[in-house]
Image (cartoon, coloured by chain):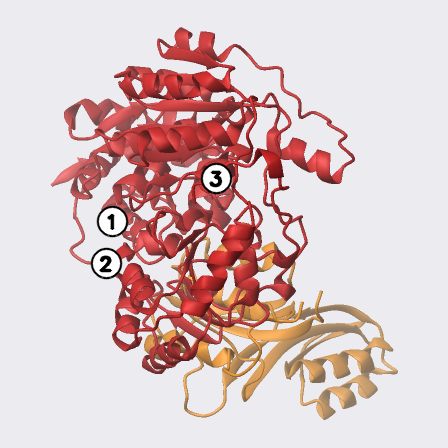
Chain colours: A red, B orange
Amino acid sequence: MELTGAQMICECLVREGVEYIFGIPGGATLPFYDLLPQYPQLKHILVRHEQVAAHAADGYARASGKVGVCCATSGPGATNLVTGIANAWLDSVPIVALTGEVVRGLVGRDGFQEADITGITLPVTKHNYLALDAADLPRIMREAFYIAFTGRPGPVLIDIPRDVFQQKAEFVYPEKMEMRGYRPVPQPDREHIDRAAELINESKQPLILAGHGVIISQAYEELRELAEKDNIPVITTLLGISSFPGSHRLCLGMPGMHGMYWNNMAISECDLLIAIGMRFDDRVTGRLRDFAPNAKVIHIDIDPAEIGKNVRPTVPLQGDAKAVLKELNRQVESREREEWLAHLEELRREHPSITIRETDNLLPQYVIKTIYEASKGNCSVVTGVGQHQMWAAQFFWFDKPNSLFTAGGLGPMGFEVPAAIGVQIARPGELVWSICGDGSFQMTLQDLITVTINDLPIKFAIINNGHLGMVRQWQHLFYRDNLVATPLKNPDFVKIAEAYDILGIRVTDKHLVEAAVYRAMEHPGPVVIDFQVQKDENLYPMVPPGAALQETMDLPKYEEERVVAHA
Amino acid sequence: MRELRKHIIIALVEDKPGVLNRIASKWRQRGFNIESLAVGHSETAGLSRMTFVVDANTDADQVVKQLDKLVDVVEIRDISDENTISRELALIKVKATAENRSLIIEIVNIFRADIIDVGPESLIIEVTGPDDKIDAMFNLLKDYGVVEIVRTGRVALLRGVASSTPGLHELAEEPFERYPEGETPYSSD
């Protein structure tokens, strides 16, 4: 059957089970858009900036467990995708980005709206393609989805010149793929499994560090079995949050730069670290040379290049987290570990870390805790990047698997609006809270119109402290409180919401927080709440940049004002 | 920054546009200089074999693992510490007069090199060997006036019957050996 390149792409998208494409059309992709009405199963979500398309595909992929698809035209359309692609790269999210390109005869000749997007995205994609012949498209599309989704997931970009969209060729859908150089899932060594089980059985003070890999491989049950059977406490990295029930007696929350004080001490004291699907990011380890000085390390990761990158493991276990944990669980013996658990409990009791002080001021932590309590954690949470993101990670204890969606590796401000769009589309009946920073929100707020048009009942909670808060905090702590370019003169967020036909609520009084949160949840449509919180609230605990976990600055104790932490 | 040393890396890669760029990009990202690079068809259709010499610290190992992840890299291996044989070819254009021509020819003979072009005032010499041999010859010829030298960069193979790039399954397990048990689990800096 002879088809045009554009038809082939649509046929392949349908075969891959794609339902949504986030994008903006342009000259180079017009032949593709021209066809979309003939493929009603491919629903196009028009956004207002390509960065939003990529982040929305990212949020959609994380929430649905499928590959997210975004689409942009050549040149500026493609370059606007780059932040979102880089984010998916660092957070291991499967997305396929389709970009239009100038016609083949103009490629490399600085044609109008030409950018070498395969060159630009080379370091931030798992793989990318420049399709120069329509006959190659079925193979390229099939490989792209396979590469994006398998092994350690990641973004794949396909650049398609406009005349390749229009070129006719025989459509041959490949039955199988031949990629000699692609080996997505390594197998762990039998001996290493045995050795790891031995280490766990011998250990007196073990800890599990659970990362995003647990969520990607859906190893929730296996992780829980290991933890419960052996009474091993579980620390979840930022992206590992919701891989293990937050209210579980063995869950200790987040470690690292803004993690719980007790976790940073526990890591420093433990004799065995079982790291699962995490990559020892510098925000987790602090100064590497002093990280977990007494611990042997078992590192489970699907990506061989992660093993030994930052921390040399005593026992490396390459492989899919679920498969490796299953094997491991067979050999791990039951232990009580009363002393170790009691010691950690004491650390927790003695250190405030996430205590909220009693005050009439409107504190950001209080807002997030109220949302947590009102929703009973029964929702999906999306965040932007900054202080509010860390507070959301600290004060929300997620019980539902895969329910926090946050940009960990790249840390792109402006993630909260687009990712929430993707998450809500993937989970239509779900309550989605988007915790926003006032600075972060303004990087992508133009896409509130996408929220309105698509009837997405997302609840946006802007933690508005009138500053680029995280940067302000660093200026305060490390640059003599010299606040340069961090105070923000903000627009009226309620008016903005109303301009987009969204319910806007302003909260300046602590006593109205709860009412606003309930009002938002009862409202059937989207809501923007502008929480005008205390401007100079700092985020603790904190490991100063370059310092070791042992040097964690805990939340200052406010003795007379303390309320009970909920953890 | 740890001390740099030369790493000889051989790779079997898809013979497609952009592959070199992907590989070079990983070295560039870490600021490692590629000293030489030789690429040509391998014994398998559609695959090229590359030999590159890189000035890198111990992180070269990390980069090799990342390169192994590239879809277009079928096999890759750092053979710096293995029993290898490597050769390089150079063409050297040297000034030659009637008086010193015979002296140059003597050097050429000692190095088992060939004269492949003779002009009224110059010679072009072809020499093959390990890179130190080429360096030595170049140093001797400098006194006569080297106009130009061009070097192919090293090509290398493992000695013996073993393939320089072993089968996929062997390779998948290999990284474990690089992290022997019993050592302290962390690098010291």
For image coordinates 64% across by 64% down, the residue present is A290
Q: Amino acid at mark 1?
A: Arg
Label 1 near label 2: C-beta < 8 Å? yes
| A200, A385: nearer the viewer | A200
Q: Which residue is mark 3?
A: A564
Q: Is B181 left or right of B91, judged from the image as shown?
A: left
Q: Earlier in the sequence, mark 2 or mark 1?
A: 1
Q: Nearer the viewer, residue A471 or A357?
A: A357
Placement of B66 over or under A527, stated as above or below? below
Within-10-Å neighbours for mark 3: few <14, some 14–19, many 20+ = few
Q: Return the mark for residue A177.
A: 2
Residue at the (55%, 52%) spot, across then down: A350
Q: Is residue A391 above or below residue B22?
A: above
Image quarter hosting the C terminus of chain B? bottom right
Q: CA distance from mark 2 to mark 3?
A: 57 Å
**Where on the picture, by quarter, is residue A529?**
top left
Quarter occupied by residue A201: bottom left
CA–CA distance between discs 2 and 1?
Answer: 8 Å
Disc number for residue B141: none
Earlier along the polypeptide chain: callout 2 or callout 3? 2
How many callouts does the rendering have? 3
User: Is circle 3 on the same chain as circle 1?
Assistant: yes
Query: Of the residues tagged 2 and 3, which is closer to the observer?
Result: 3
Instruction: Please state the horizontal and vertical placement of residue A152, each as a whole percent of the image.
Output: 36, 56
Q: Residue furthest front?
A: A560
Residue A142, label in figure: 1
Give the residue type at disc 3. Answer: Val
Mark 2 element type: loop
Q: Secondary structure at mark 1?
A: helix
